[in-house]
Image (spheres, grey):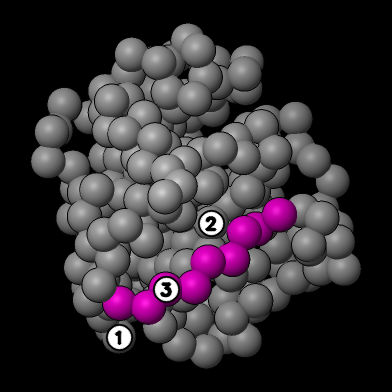
Amino acid sequence: MIRIFIGFDPHETVAWHVLCHSILARCTQPVSFTPLALDHLRDVFTRPRDPLQSTDFSFTRFLVPYLSGYEGWSLFMDCDMLVRADIAELWELRDERYAVMCVKHDHRPQETVKFLGAPQTPYGKKNWSSVMLFNNARCRALTPEYVNTASGLALHQFKWLESDDAIGGLPKTWNHLVGHDECDPTAKNVHYTIGGPYFSEYRQCEHSNAWFEDKRDMNKAF
């Protein structure tokens, strides 16, 4: 079973469902989906909202190892994505040498604002945490207490690990940053990090046609 946790924000509900559909439509192995919705985590996540926080799941993503019982592997993904290949290919890249695996972007955004007027905050390792394969037993430092109290930078810059040597790399195609990375028609996971085509001002962004095609397929009834 491929265990997938996806960040949920009510401002991007349609994005969450289209992402799930894009995975189901192409996957060759059983998958399970867990939405990281704040209403589901009230007994665990008590952290007050940070003014720099652009989504409800900015910090709840780091609860994935806890929610997985610190057992096996789990995949976390932001909801503003579209998977265009078999997610089992990504799952097969798990490597026991590492505590967590991600695409190691060198992302230095020039814009100061992104979707819905959310602030665009630059920091080291930006977007590394938007797709993470967690080797859960090696992420026991991510307790609810730590996630509720650690600084945003400590969480997103993986300060909870002994060193960066515990971070394994994934191919860039599994977290293609629309509007930042060079256009890639073969990207396996498209990340609409500035804003997805479900927002009117981003309807013409790279890979928007692919998103609308998957949305149409998701809505089919026979």
Give the distance between the C-alpha atoms of the residues marked 2 and 3, in whole angstroms: 12 Å
Q: Which mark is residue 31?
A: 3
Residue 56 position in % (x across, y down)? 69, 43
Circles 2 and 3: CB atoms closer than 8 Å = no
Q: Nearer the viewer, mark 2 or mark 1?
A: 2
Say what secondary structure mark 2 lies in. strand
Please tell me in which quadrant of the rendered image residue 218 appears: top left
Region of the chain picked out in magenta, as a range = 29-37
Left or right: 219, with 116 as reference point: left
Residue 19 position in % (x across, y down)? 43, 48
Of pointers 2 and 1, the one earlier in the residue sequence: 2
Report the amino acid beneath label 1: Glu
Circles 2 and 1: CB atoms closer than 8 Å = no
Of pointers 2 and 3, the one earlier in the residue sequence: 2
From the image, give the main secondary structure of the stretch colored magenta.
strand
Report the amino acid beneath label 3: Val
- Which residue is pictured at 40% across the width and 15% down the height? 203
Q: Which mark is residue 6?
A: 2
Of pointers 1 and 3, the one earlier in the residue sequence: 3
Task: Find disc 1 in the rendering and name its residue.
Answer: 96
Left or right: 72, with 70 as reference point: left
Return the residue nearer the eye: 169 or 37: 37
35 magenta-colored: yes
- Which residue is pictured at 52% across the width and 47% down the height? 17
Q: How would you rate the neighbour count of disc 1 (Cα within 10 Å): few for under 14, some for 14-19, many for 20 or more? A: few
Return the residue nearer the eye: 189 or 23: 23
Say what secondary structure mark 1 lies in. loop
Vertical comparison of 52 with 73: above or below: above
Q: How would you rate the neighbour count of disc 2 (Cα within 10 Å): few for under 14, some for 14-19, many for 20 or more? A: many
